């Protein structure tokens, strides 16, 4: 009888632990400071767009590539940092990175000579795991020789 009681207690403990950890990521999700973000910015003499290389991904994806495409004369600067957000229950939430991660401090420029930049994000490097749902990759940009800043988002789905 003692064996069965210990076995039952062990199973209940595992179920309780599993139940707590499955909602742990959702508990860590912070509401986004952004609401609706476009994937395109139109300046006075240029346009910048940001899109995912695919619209749909498998939950078991290894990496995602995002393309920033510049058209026109203006100069846009940005870095490698990004945010991943998930759309759930009518709101956007920031998806937390896991483990030790960092961004290379690189200043990047897009202009009429260098008009396309692809940024590939490794899921393993940032400890990202995606459940089925709608996500967006969010980046900040600056217009050179101006104090203007803007944010773009590329939306993608995990199915």
Image: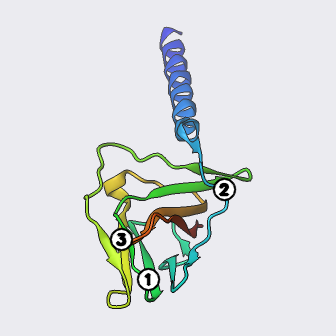
Question: Is 152 or 94 nearer to us in this picture?
Answer: 152
Residue furthest to the top: 2
Secondary structure at badge 3 equals: strand
> Reading the chain from its start, which is encountered first: label 2 or label 3?
2
Residue 43: image location, x then y, percent: 55, 79
Q: Residue at x 73, y 50 (%)?
A: 89
> Reading the chain from its start, which is encountered first: label 1 or label 3?
1
Q: Residues within 10 Å of mark 2 (few under 14, many from 20)?
A: few
Q: Which residue is mark 2?
A: 35
Q: Which color mode does the image show?
A: rainbow
Q: Which residue is mark 3?
A: 120
Would you say the residues marked 1 and 3 are in contact, meaning their CB atoms lie under 8 Å apart? no
Going by the image, does 100 lie left or right of 72? left
How far apart marks 2 and 1 lie (CA) works out to 26 Å
Q: Residue at x 55, y 63 (%)?
A: 136
Q: Which mark is residue 18?
A: none
Residue 94: image location, x then y, percent: 54, 49
Residue 108: image location, x then y, percent: 31, 71
User: In the displayed structure, would residue 49 be above or below residue 30?
Assistant: below
> Reading the chain from its start, which is encountered first: label 2 or label 1?
2
Q: Which residue is mark 1?
A: 74
User: In the displayed structure, would residue 102 be above or below residue 111?
Assistant: above
How far apart marks 1 and 3 lie (CA) works out to 24 Å
Single out the mark in the foreground, 1 or 3.
1
Secondary structure at badge 2 equals: loop
Q: Quadrant of residue 75?
A: bottom left
Question: Is 46 or 155 nearer to us in this picture?
Answer: 46
Single out the mark in the foreground, 2 or 3.
2
Single out the mark in the foreground, 2 or 1.
1
Question: Is 157 or 120 nearer to us in this picture?
Answer: 120
Q: Residue at x 53, y 68 (%)?
A: 152
Going by the image, does 104 lie left or right of 35? left
């Amino acid at each position: 009888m003692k064996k069965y009681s210990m076995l039952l207690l062990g199973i209940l403990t595992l179920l309780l632990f599993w139940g707590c950890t499955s909602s742990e990521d959702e508990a860590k999700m912070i509401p986004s400071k952004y609401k609706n973000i476009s994937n395109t910015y139109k300046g006075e003499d240029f346009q910048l767009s940001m899109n995912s290389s695919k619209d749909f991904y498998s939950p078991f994806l290894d990496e995602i590539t995002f393309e920033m495409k510049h058209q026109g004369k203006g100069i846009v600067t940005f870095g490698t940092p990004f945010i991943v957000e998930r759309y759930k229950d009518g709101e956007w939430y920031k998806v937390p990175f896991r483990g030790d991660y960092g961004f290379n401090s690189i200043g990047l420029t897009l202009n009429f000579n260098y008009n396309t930049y692809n940024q590939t994000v490794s899921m393993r490097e940032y400890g990202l795991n995606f459940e089925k749902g709608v996500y967006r990759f969010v980046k900040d940009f600056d217009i050179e020789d101006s104090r203007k800043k803007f944010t773009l988002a590329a939306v993608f789905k995990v199915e």
